[in-house]
Image (cartoon, rainbow, N blue to C red):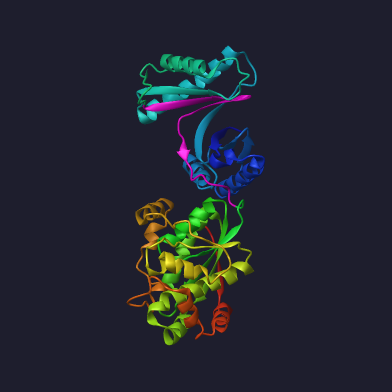
């Protein structure tokens, strides 16, 4: 059966030491799972630092590339022509590679109208008797003979043609489609992300998943002050994130009774930080119950009153679990750009309220003191409020968006 071949480069995984085979196996497994959704008869194998994907000819290249590049751990992918060089003299092998390269370039002339090219050759198999620079010169000469309309331009070619000679196989390709890099999912435990309907938290979830962490999510709402449509928006965001990290569970908790108790018993300027501390406690409780190792938030230092350095210190004092903040030092513009790249931005900016906008004080404390916050919390039955909130928790499995 004829097949299409794709060369997958592993990026950071390639830098691992003794445990490199483990990371490669995990990456192969993730690629297989991703491709299983779009077709059958697909082979995924690793070989000397690269991963080779072979698919039936009828499977659309665009769909294959989209699936592979969304897998964390993939640095880049190249659709390639595979040439069998197991047998034959060096001259015969070069003739076969040259014929494949000429056909490849003829197709590019027809489809893209290219006029100039450059050949970059790499002899991964050091037993092959012809060295890389000479391979490049020989293949370049064959292309000039076979494609009269082309000329060589080593500085700004229309096409940079790569030739890779490996053990038993050679590959001709031009495209290098970038992936997100990072580490394969499942290689760095599991974390609980506090997922709102805003721009930041979905990006934070994406970045931690990119480091190999499986995720679950918790969302806080203030129904009926927040609407069903706001909850649907959060589920839409979660389904986009699930496209990168696979299906996960989102736990939903109504924060309104806690907010009302804080408003009735505590200073107005401390409402935001007190609510935030309850959110962290509740997230930690659910995280422990679901096997998560840490909490993940989209907080960005100095962005709002609850994200000043002083406020973050007071917030962290409410939990024992480590809190990961992957966006902590990023510019808001950079966060927005990444949200656009991963596809969450347009959903995030839909104008539906979230729990953080309910009972928002006019002048929130930006430099809270832990002693004063603890004094205010002494007027609340913290444990009873938490138990009541957890008793009403709902959980929803989120599937990747098609």
Location of residue 93 in the rendering, given as x and y in whole percent from the top left corner: 58, 17
298 or 59, which is in the foreground?
A: 298
Location of residue 48 in the rendering, given as x and y in whole percent from the top left corner: 63, 32
Magenta residue check for 308: no
- The N terminus is located in which quarter? top right
Q: Is residue 402 visible?
A: no
Residue 356, quarter of the rendered image:
bottom left
Location of residue 290 in the rendering, given as x and y in whole percent from the top left corner: 62, 66
Magenta residue check for 166: yes
Asked whether, in this view, residue 380 is left or right of residue 352, the answer is: right
Whether 384 is drawn above or below 25: the answer is: below
Q: Is residue 263 visible?
A: yes
76 or 88, which is in the foreground?
A: 76
Residue 295, quarter of the rendered image:
bottom right
- Residue for point 65% across, 43% down: 25
75 or 343, which is in the foreground?
A: 75
- Residue for point 54% across, 60% down: 399
Asked whether, in this view, residue 139 is left or right of residue 24, the answer is: left
Asked whether, in this view, residue 75 is left or right of residue 302, the answer is: right
Whether 247 is drawn above or below 86: the answer is: below
- Residue for point 51% across, 84% down: 378
The span picked out in magenta is 158-185
For this orientation, the residue located farthest to the left is 362
């Amino acid at each position: 059966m004829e097949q299409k071949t794709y060369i997958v480069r592993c990026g950071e995984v390639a830098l691992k030491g003794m445990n490199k085979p483990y990371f490669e196996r995990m990456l192969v497994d993730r690629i297989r799972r991703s491709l299983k959704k779009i077709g059958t008869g697909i082979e995924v194998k690793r070989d000397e630092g690269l991963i080779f994907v072979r698919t039936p000819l009828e499977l659309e290249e665009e769909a294959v590339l989209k699936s592979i590049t969304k897998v964390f751990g993939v640095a880049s992918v190249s659709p390639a022509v595979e040439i069998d060089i197991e047998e034959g003299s060096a001259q015969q092998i070069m003739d076969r590679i040259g014929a494949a390269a000429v056909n490849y370039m003829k197709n590019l002339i027809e489809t893209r109208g290219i006029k100039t090219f450059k050949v970059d050759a790499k002899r991964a198999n050091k037993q092959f008797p012809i060295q890389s620079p000479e391979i490049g010169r020989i293949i370049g000469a064959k292309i000039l003979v076979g494609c009269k309309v082309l000329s060589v331009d080593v500085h700004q070619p229309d096409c940079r043609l790569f030739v890779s000679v490996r053990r038993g196989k050679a590959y001709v390709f031009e495209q290098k489609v970038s992936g997100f890099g990072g580490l394969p999912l499942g290689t760095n435990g599991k974390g609980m992300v506090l997922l709102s309907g805003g721009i930041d938290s979905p990006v934070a979830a994406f970045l931690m998943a990119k480091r190999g962490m499986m995720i679950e999510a918790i969302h806080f709402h203030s129904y009926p002050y927040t609407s069903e449509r706001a909850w649907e928006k959060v589920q839409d965001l979660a389904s986009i994130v699930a496209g990168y990290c696979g299906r996960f569970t989102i736990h939903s908790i109504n924060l309104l009774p806690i907010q009302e108790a804080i408003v009735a018993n505590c200073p107005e300027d401390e409402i935001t930080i007190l609510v935030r501390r309850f959110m962290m406690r509740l997230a930690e409780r659910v995280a422990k119950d679901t096997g998560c190792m840490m909490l993940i938030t989209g907080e960005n230092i100095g962005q709002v009153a609850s994200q000043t350095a002083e406020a973050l210190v007071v917030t962290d004092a409410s939990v024992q679990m480590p809190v990961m903040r992957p966006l902590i030092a990023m510019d808001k513009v950079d966060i927005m750009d990444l949200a656009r790249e991963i596809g969450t931005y347009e959903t995030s900016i839909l104008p539906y309220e979230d729990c953080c906008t309910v009972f928002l004080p006019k002048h929130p404390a930006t430099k809270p003191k832990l002693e004063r916050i603890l004094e205010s919390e002494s007027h609340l039955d913290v444990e009873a409020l938490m138990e009541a909130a957890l008793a009403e928790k709902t959980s929803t499995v989120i599937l990747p968006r098609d």
